[in-house]
């Protein structure tokens, strides 16, 4: 966590609504095993905190789960889905794992850099976009792809990537999923089996 992020962090507690959600997650686990709820609680804290988890939020989660703070920090620093510093309104996570790389992830990275005017790990001056590179997001068959906030955009090329970023900038996000019209994970040429109901 940068000094700026830690200095800007205020004491964190769940809102009553989110505390009820946290309690529901905790209730899924037997007594003494409540630490198993750490990931959903960190995700909930991140959503409440504007897309990132402050040290105060991690400590609050740890107290609710009767976990030592270091155990919560270990989890929070391991997963790329958890942000330890503020991110833009639209968090563009570019997959760089082998299938996406082989299908053009480098060109997508360059398109994002050119369109947004920021490098990897950067946030635009207006606070709208943060660009990060992550490992496999699990949509390998529809590579290359990016995740923007909670949505996957698949079967991308640089031109479509630029269009998507412009649509987000205009506050008109396009529909997620395949950007070529591919049906789920069918071959790019279309389904070859079970073509009739």
Image: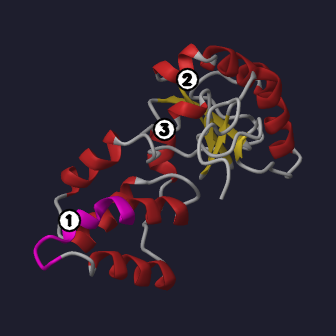
Front tag of 3 and 1: 3
Query: Relative to residue 68, is residue 114 depicted above or below?
Result: above
**Vertical arrangement, residue 94 with respect to residue 54, above or below:** above
Q: Quadrant of the C terminus?
A: bottom right
**Neighbours of disc 1 within 10 Å: few (<14), some (14-19), many (20+):** some
Of 81 and 196, nearer the camera is: 196
How many residues crowd mark 2 within 10 Å: few (<14), some (14–19), many (20+)? many
The tag earlier along the polypeptide, 2 or 1, is: 1
* Residue beneath the point at 79% across and 36% down: 165
What's the distance in space between the residues labelled 2 and 1, CA to CA?
34 Å
Secondary structure under badge 1?
helix
Q: Which percent across, then down, holds residue 167? A: 85, 43
Which of the pair 98/46 is nearer the observer? 98
Whole-angstrom CA distance, mark 3 to mark 1, is 25 Å
Q: Is residue 137 left or right of residue 117?
A: left
In the rendered image, residue 145, in percent from the top left (x then y), is placed at 62, 32
Tell me the tag on residue 137: 3
């Amino acid at each position: 966590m940068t000094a700026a992020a830690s200095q800007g962090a205020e004491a964190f507690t769940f809102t009553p609504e989110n505390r009820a959600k946290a309690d529901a997650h905790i209730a899924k686990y037997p007594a003494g095993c409540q630490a198993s709820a750490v990931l959903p609680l960190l995700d909930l804290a991140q959503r409440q905190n504007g897309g990132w988890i402050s040290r105060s939020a991690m400590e609050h989660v740890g107290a609710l789960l009767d976990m030592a703070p270091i155990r919560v920090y270990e989890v929070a620093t391991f997963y790329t889905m958890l942000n330890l510093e503020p991110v833009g309104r639209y968090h563009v996570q570019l997959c760089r794992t082998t299938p996406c790389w082989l299908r053009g992830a480098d060109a997508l990275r360059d398109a994002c850099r050119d369109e947004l005017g920021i490098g990897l790990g950067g946030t635009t001056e207006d606070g709208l976009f943060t660009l990060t590179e992550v490992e496999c997001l699990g949509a390998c068959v529809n590579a290359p792809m990016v995740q923007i906030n909670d949505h996957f955009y698949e079967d991308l090329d640089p031109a479509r990537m630029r269009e998507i970023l412009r649509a987000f900038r205009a506050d008109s996000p396009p529909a997620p999923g395949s950007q070529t019209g591919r049906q789920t994970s069918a071959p790019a040429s279309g389904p070859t089996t079970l073509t009739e109901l």
